[in-house]
Every structure is written in C-alpha cells, then in structure tokens.
C-alpha cells in the first residue's frame, strides 16, 4: 500500500516509512566509504611519498565533494557531502599554514580555527540549528549512549598513548603552559 505522495520507485509502509532496498543502502554507504578510501590514500601519499602530492590529492577530494554536493538533488546527501569536505581541509590547513615560528602547543588551535569556520559555514548553509549539531545544553546531556561510549574512548586513548608514546608538548610544568597544552588537546584534537 502506497502513502499519498510516495513515488512509484520507493515502497513505503502505511505509516509513511520508506522501505529501502539493498541497492539504495549500497549507494548510501558508498559515498562515505569512497571518501574514507580516498582520504586514506591521500594520507598515505602525504606521509610516504610527498607532502605536495598529498596536498594535491586532498584538494582534489575537496573539489569532488563540493561538485557532488552541488549536483545532488537530495538534501540529506548534500549535507553529508558538504560535511565530509571538512576532513581533507584539516590536512590541507595543517600542510599549508606557516606554523614553523609557533611552538607546537599552538599548532592545534591554529589549524582548527579555519576548520571550525568551515564547519560553521557548512552548518549555516544546511540550515542546521545548534541543537541539530549537538551544541545545546540538551545536546550535551549525558545519555545512556554517551555513558556506554565513555569507557571505549578511554580505552582507545590509552591504547593510542601506549602505541605512539608521544612526547610532552611542553617541558615546563607551570600552570600557563600546562593549561594551554590541556586546552589545546581537549578542544583541538
């Protein structure tokens, strides 16, 4: 039984819920998986071959995502494509910003500032409210899912620390450098 206004191609339940077939589901996950593969390839090229070539690949990914987002007629897919643009932008900014004169502790906020501007512009373009992107007091509340994921985040952080054995961002244990280091790590990574 078809609901009023439903297209002949999309089967719907009487309550108006779309029944999505395997082909539509494959298309829906194909874009994020393809972007993940392209960004992974660009990251490998950046790290192992040439930073310049990696930069070109990341810029190409941005252009392709913007082009696909502009051409799609589906609002949800457009929002996804525009949101995915932020991922290669992080690497582009980290490679292009002249940060050599700054202490390492300030690199993270310097890179994240233009990324956050990009996120704000993408959210505004898609007419997302603060609640839609989880930046309200109701969006920050601890739900059961957050409580379940907190131990996973802690375990992944410990595993990352053990594997990478990172050097401290600052050797000075006084409050301002440690505070800046903590704030940069908390907000910008």
Image: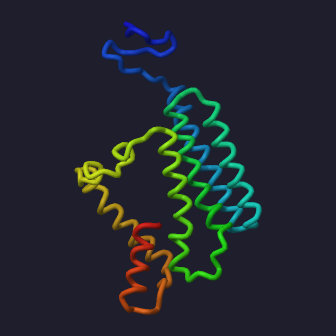
In-image side of 78 versus 162 (left or right): right
* Number of marks: 0
Quadrant where the N terminus is found in the figure? top left
Question: Where's residue 5, x and y in %?
Answer: 43, 10
User: Which residue is at 62% across, 63% downward?
Assistant: 93
Question: Residue 172 falls in which quadrant of the image?
Answer: bottom left
Where 13 sits versus 178, above or below?
above
Q: Position of residue 58 (x, y in %)?
A: 68, 55
> In front here: 148 or 74?
74
Is residue 49 visible in this depiction of the protein? no
What residue is rendered at 44% in x and 73% in y? Answer: 184
Whole-percent x, y for residue 67 in the image: 67, 38
Above or below, 133 against 111 in this view is: above
- Residue at point 35%, 17% (across, down): 16
Residue at 58% over, 60% down: 90
Instruction: Pick the residue in front: 62 or 180.
Output: 180
Q: Answer above or below: position of 69 versus 24.
A: below
Colouring method of the image: rainbow
| Side of 153 relative to 90 (left or right) | left
Residue 137, can we see it?
yes
Q: Position of residue 79 (x, y in %)?
A: 51, 38
């Amino acid at each position: 039984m078809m609901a009023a206004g439903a297209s002949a191609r999309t089967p719907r339940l009487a309550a108006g819920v779309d029944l999505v077939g395997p082909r539509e589901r494959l298309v829906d996950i194909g874009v994020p998986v393809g972007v993940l593969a392209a960004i992974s390839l660009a990251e490998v090229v950046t790290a192992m071959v040439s930073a310049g070539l990696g930069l070109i690949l990341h810029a190409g990914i941005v252009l392709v995502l913007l082009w696909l987002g502009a051409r799609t007629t589906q609002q949800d897919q457009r929002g996804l494509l525009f949101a995915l643009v932020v991922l290669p932008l992080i690497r582009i900014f980290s490679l292009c910003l002249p940060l050599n004169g700054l202490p390492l502790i300030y690199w993270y906020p310097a890179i994240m500032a233009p990324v956050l501007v990009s996120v704000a512009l993408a959210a505004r373009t898609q007419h997302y409210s603060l609640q839609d992107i989880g930046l309200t007091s109701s969006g920050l509340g601890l739900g059961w899912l957050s409580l379940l994921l907190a131990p996973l985040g802690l375990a992944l952080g410990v595993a990352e620390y053990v594997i990478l054995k990172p050097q401290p961002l600052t050797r000075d244990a006084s409050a301002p450098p440690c505070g800046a280091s903590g704030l940069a790590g908390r907000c910008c990574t």
